[in-house]
Amino acid sequence: MTAAQRGILLVLVVGIFAASTVSHQLTPLFMVIICAGLVLVGRCTPRGLPILFGAILIGWVSYETVGYWSGHLPQLLSEIGRLGGTFSASVGNRLVGTPMHKIAVDSRAAFAALMVILAVAGAVRRRLRRISDRALLVLLVAPLAIAAFQNYGGEVSLRIYLFMLPALAVLAANLFFPPARPAQAVQAEPAEPQPAEQAPAGPVPAGPEPAGPAPAGVWRSVRSAAVLALAGVLAAGLGELFLLSRYGNEAFERTPPGELAAVNYIYRHRGVAVLWLSRPAGLGTTPQMPWQYHRIASVNFASVRAPVDPADIASIVGYLKRQGAGAYLVTVTTEATFIRQSASYPADWERNFREALSGAPGLQLMLSNRDAAVYRARLPASAPRARPPVNSGTGPSVRTIWSPVGLVALFVSLLLLTARELVRECLPARRWLMRPLALASVPAVVLLLAAVIERFRILALPVPGPRTAVRSCKGVPDEYRSRTGQDRFPGGSPERAGPGHRHQHPRPDPEGRPVSAACRRPRRDQDTRAARRARVHDQRARTHPGRRVALLRRAVCQADDRS
């Protein structure tokens, strides 16, 4: 391969990784781990490629996904290291359902276990023949590391298996092919030709008849035929097992047009909260319906446990009413089929459940078709509107100097790291440039990591909201203030609240308790000492939103005490 071809291939690989980074959460992590493993075992020539991939991934997560992780980063990081819970949620909790469904689920686990056994046997066979398969072993083992980071909604075991499957297939095939002969067999040098002797004149006497094929050759042919027949039988058996393992999923993995019409109805009428049914164990974290393909940051999807008794809908109706205006309850056929197969619900459960919902006086049927039904609670015109999801915007409006610094460091790091690898692959005569480029990229990468860590520390602070308990003013308990939503700031984030702002009017308590007037922040006079102190504290803590919120709250409470 020429130097130009290697350079083009390197650019294509980096482009594929960049496209994977912006399109999926787990794929770039797998690629970084596998690439680092290949570098460690000496099977990847561009040794700086894992660092380049890591810089691309860190930059994307830090700047382009801040609207997702800002405010609840501790919850996202809480799954790190929980290997037992991860494998229990992705394997053990899925081996449930009707007897027919359990056959399909058990066959999936058996299929994966059989592939692993065949791959291990193939790797052992190759090792006994003194053949090194370090690249395949890295592809086989590296995806397991992702289980230490998150459970991916209970599907991380499936994702790990999918990324291991290429290596599993090749190693399983190596159990039968190629023939059992060492790869390092040295070809014998041809002997020097001997001078031909003078053939005697006259007729040559007839010798013995040539013997048949050697016994070793016959045994080799028989063994090859037996191995080929065994491989064919095993391939046919795996094909049948695959059909058995996937049986039943087509009933709830398709998307009927009626379900799409129901979700479009909710989007068209500006729904804010959508309730969907899940099985009683609460394992179905992802609904079996089209969702979150539009307005992903402004519609909150919440699961409600499906009652075993289809007539027991009081709790569901009450929960829907408590959500407020703009909340909808949707029932779809695919989710009902999933519940019926995985939780052994009766065959007529969906029909009876819809009849109960249609007859409930507190619900109003908004849309009904063969595949789905949409309901809305009957609420007065003055009912509060349902709350949108947390971080429903493009991210917090906190401004920190580390954001532009990190962007500059990211650009410089990508430029230097890419140039270093291109010099390695395309300019072998100028490889002396690799060391200066590497030394120049070190401070840029360190500065990028420092900027990312500081951004995470500042922007990951939870925004005070209905689920955040904060320090209260005198006479009002913390849990009551957080439940009434009175600690929310104008604009939804503390950095938009000036030193003289007032609280939004709290929503009435669901239990009907009066709202204490001591917790309301009065408009502070600009000539008072508390107002001047608040402005000074605001100027000092402008770059730290957590400290700013604490100082503002302390100044307001002091003003309340003096008044």
Image (cartoon, grey):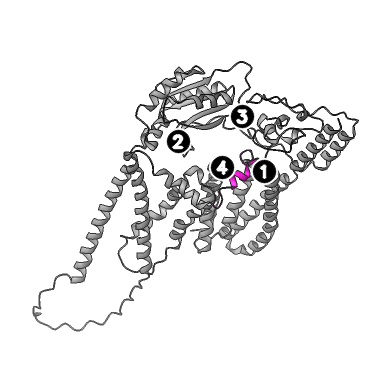
**Image coords of residue 142 (percent x, y):** 49, 56
- Residue highlighted by disc 1: 460
**Which of the 4 image quadrants contains residue 257?**
top left
State the quadrant of the C terminus: top right
Q: Is residue 10 above or below residue 65?
A: below
Closer to the camera: disc 4 or disc 2?
A: 2
Q: How far is the residue under mark 3 from the one under mark 2?
A: 26 Å
Viewer can see residue 252: no
In the rendered structure, which disc, 4 or 2, sits on the residue that comes first in sequence? 4
Q: How far is the residue under mark 1 from the one under mark 2?
A: 33 Å
Q: Nearer the viewer, residue 528 or 513?
A: 513
Residue type indicated by callout 2: Pro
Q: Which residues are magenta?
A: 67-81
- Residue highlighted by disc 4: 22
Residue 80 falls inside the magenta stretch? yes
- Residue highlighted by disc 2: 280
